[in-house]
Amino acid sequence: TEVVKLVIALVSWLCQFRKLEHTGLETFRWSSSLVFAVPAMLFAAQNNLVYFAMQDLDPPTFQLWACFKLIPVGVFSRFILHKQLSQVQWTALLLLAVGMASTTISCTGARLHDGGSAGWSRKTRGIMVLLLNGCLSGLSGVFNEWLIKFQDPKAPLMYKNAMLYTF
């Protein structure tokens, strides 16, 4: 999938190349391109964590907790990109969190462990993986948006996408 995305980004960039005032190559430095490896690694980790969560959760629970990524996106957007969220948006994020928690508690009877303190239940482990995955998803998405907007603002989007997909 990532190779296909890289090919599409490169072909789109090359098709526009002759018409572009700033291609991105004028300011290219290996050291500045390495920063695109950060969201790439975060995306790779998040894509692999999904499979661990799928092993431990039934489909409705997985889908419910996969929505958690919206909460870190809102928080990271506020603090990294300095986006202002309205009171309604903050309330929506809070209601999403409360709804997810209350649905899970009512389904599991508020138990975090199966059979005592020997270990976490599969469901709880799957939810914890999705919480981590949501945080990685939010951070990678917001960091990628920061790179697109603020890392060499004149460079075309397809050039930046090609950098990301290369890593």
Image (cartoon, helix red, strand yellow):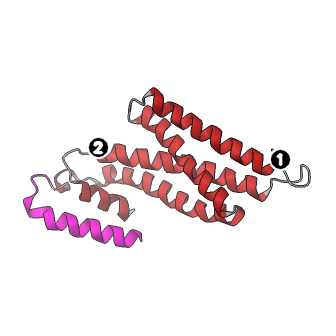
Q: Which residues are magenta?
A: 1-22
Q: CA distance from mark 2 to mark 1?
A: 44 Å
39 displayed left or right of 23? right
Residue 82: image location, x then y, percent? 38, 31
Q: Is residue 87 magenta?
A: no
Q: Quadrant of residue 19?
A: bottom left
Q: Residues within 10 Å of mark 1 (few under 14, many from 20)?
A: some
Front-most of 37 and 144?
144
Residue 106: image location, x then y, percent? 76, 46
Residue 100: image location, x then y, percent? 64, 45
The residue to which callout 1 is attached is 111
The three-letter code of the residue at mark 1 reads Arg
The three-letter code of the residue at mark 2 reads Lys
Q: Secondary structure at mark 1?
A: loop
Viewport quadrant of the N terminus: bottom left
Q: Secondary structure at mark 2?
A: helix
Q: How many marks?
A: 2
143 displayed left or right of 127? left
Q: Is residue 10 above or below residue 154?
A: below
What residue is at 57 percent from the left and 47 percent from the top? Answer: 68
What residue is at 27 percent from the left and 65 percent from the top? Answer: 9
Upstream in sequence: badge 2 or badge 1: 1
Most frequent secondary structure within the magenta stretch:
helix
| Contact, mark 2 vs mark 1 (Cβ under 8 Å) | no
117 displayed left or right of 14? right
Front-most of 163 and 85?
85
The residue to which callout 2 is attached is 149
Viewport quadrant of the C terminus: bottom left
Q: Residue furthest top?
A: 87
What residue is at 41 percent from the left and 55 percent from the top? Answer: 37
Q: Is residue 9 magenta?
A: yes
